[in-house]
Image (spheres, helix red, strand yellow):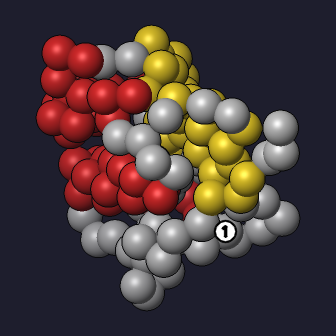
């Protein structure tokens, strides 16, 4: 079984020595998605809601490129720069998963790339 690199222009290009996602067999592993507009590679304007929305759009794009969608996500790891944003983040996140929410960890971190407010990575299946 060979590892497959997942790449799409519908999500931000990698800004370091990594790929948007990898697939091995039926499993998909996404890199952490931050709120970059894939067309401009700029951080989206606005607060946690706008940034969470862009993060989820980017995550969905990588999943789609791998042949998966949010209903196939088994686990996410969510990183917030401020746990005071937890409720607002959850409101956006819930719209993408609804009743089919995956297992999840959500932690506050000292700092995220480009000083964004949120980053999300996922493990899914196809």
Residue under the point 32% across and 56% down: 57
24 to 103, vertically: above or below: below
65 to 119, vertically: above or below: below
Q: As drawn, is 31 to the left or to the right of 78? A: right
- The percent position of residue 9, horizontal first and vertical second, equals 48, 77
Q: Is residue 84 visible?
A: no
Q: Toward the viewer: 88 or 26?
A: 26
Q: As drawn, is 62 to the left or to the right of 44? A: right
Q: Toward the viewer: 86 or 20?
A: 20
- The percent position of residue 69, horizontal first and vertical second, equals 35, 40
Q: Toward the viewer: 45 or 68?
A: 68
Q: Considering the numbered disc 1 on the image, is that residue within a helix, a strand or a loop?
A: loop
- The percent position of residue 12, horizontal first and vertical second, equals 51, 70
Q: Toward the viewer: 19 or 94?
A: 19
> For the view shown, which residue lies furthest in the bottom direction?
40
Residue under the point 34% across and 70% down: 44
66 to 108, vertically: above or below: below
Residue identified by numbered label 1: 14
């Amino acid at each position: 079984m060979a590892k497959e690199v997942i790449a799409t222009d519908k999500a931000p290009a990698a800004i370091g020595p990594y790929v948007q996602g990898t697939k091995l067999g039926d499993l998909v592993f996404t890199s952490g998605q931050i709120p970059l507009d894939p067309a401009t590679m700029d951080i989206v304007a606005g607060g946690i809601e706008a940034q969470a929305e862009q993060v989820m759009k980017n995550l969905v794009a990588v999943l789609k490129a791998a042949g998966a969608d949010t209903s196939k996500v088994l686990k996410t790891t969510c990183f917030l720069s401020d746990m005071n944003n937890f409720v607002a983040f959850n409101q956006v996140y819930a719209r993408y998963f609804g009743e089919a929410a995956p297992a999840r960890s959500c932690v506050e971190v000292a700092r995220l790339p480009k000083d964004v407010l949120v980053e999300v990575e996922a493990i899914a299946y196809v």
